Image (cartoon, rainbow, N blue to C red):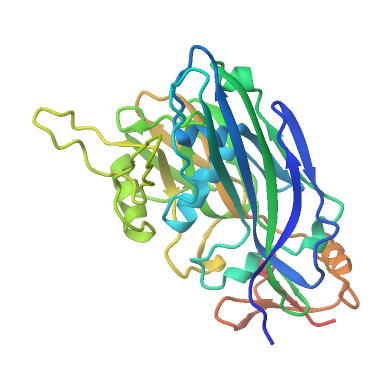
Amino acid sequence: MFRGQSFFKLEQKALAMPGSIQVSLKETPQGVRAPAIMAVLDLVITQGGAAVAIAGEQLHRIFKNIQLGDKILSTGQHFRILSHHVRGLQFSQPADVPATNAGVFNRRVAVMIPFSDPRAASPGDSAMRPELFAQKPLSIDFSDLPSLFPNVASITGTLTTYLVNEPASPLVLPSDVEIGKLDWNGQHIVIEGSRLYTHLAIFNEDGSSIDDTQVSTVQLTADGQVLSNLPVRLADLVRYFDWLNAEGGSLQVNSATAPVAGEALPDDPLVGNGAANTVSVPWIPLLTPPPRYGLSRCLQVNKNLVIDVTGSKTAFRVGWRSVPPRTEAQRQQANAQLGFPRPSGSFDIKTADGSTSSSQRLAQYLPLQHKG
């Protein structure tokens, strides 16, 4: 009987700001794969005597860094945006915190680490095997409260983490997933390294919007090959994301009582009489895969990916979800950790449509069916 997906509660620990929490994966069930890890903060926020309102989406900045092994490392703000990018809807939209002196407010903030993409043709291809991280705890660093929210008297809370899991396919080594970020000064952004990109975005860590005077156009170049004949306008990148992935409208309401999470990104200027002909977005989708995509159809970069930007903005944070290449030594080590017989044995390359491939290019990235 296939039991489907289930939750495995990892740990529940008290929040400390600043501070760090280590979550062990040693006791997770054997023989499963994990489409995602979910981390949920239950917060009690006490405003100070000179209270200042806090937008709900700012609360994700409490997660200063989230790291798992050497391939997952980014901020709570990036994971919030990545969930929107992957699913086409906002996963967590806490209510604002009002400017009420000495007020006490309960808020819940969640982040998801998406090893799998539910919109891919074969989501399980990149589902994480917990055995590969038995010696690598999930590490979560929290921001310094006075630096982040100087008018807040205190924030206490509890972090609860879950491993979303399902039975793993026998003798299949999944693709690795990398989630990372890069800060860059200048309008010629260079991301070094080999990877298959599934998602790529520009965003501001403080959650502020970016308009098309700041970023007018974007041009991507992979290994020296320009990906579009002319630079693409910000609004048109957003419009394409909305067409591919977005669910629902673009109206987002930040509220202390009834927040509404926007789903599509705004791609039109304000419509009022005399309003500026400007599009403003919370983040910019640079690469968005189509529904039911296969990894073999994603952008492969061998040396570097260059992002050329025009506009007034010169400081950038770029975040991505990708599949890094796997070396033969890494394949054998992972096979041994998973208990496969004869870790150095032969394999078939598993593709999304169930067929096999002999492409050595794909063998670095796609799941491998171990033959022994």
| Residue depicted at x 34% and y 46% | 265
- Whether 360 is drawn above or below 140: the answer is below
- Where residue 146 appears, as percent x and y from the top left, is 62, 17
x, y percent for residue 151: 54, 16
Position of residue 150 in the picture relative to residue 337 (left or right): left
Q: Quadrant of residue 334?
A: bottom right
Note whether 98 is above or below 261 in the view shown: above
Of 322 and 250, the residue lying toward us: 250
Q: Is residue 25 above or below residue 236?
A: below
Q: On the rendered structure, is 167 left or right of 79?
A: right
Residue 21, by quadrant, is: top right
Q: Quadrant of the N terminus?
A: bottom right
Is residue 233 visible to us here? no
In what quadrant of the picture does the C terminus appear?
bottom right
Instruction: In this rendered view, identify the residue nearer to me: 21 or 372.
Output: 21
Instruction: Choose between 303 and 87: the one closer to the eye.
Output: 87
| Residue shown at the point (55%, 42%) measured from the top left | 108
3 versus 142 height, above or below: below
Count of labels in the image:
0
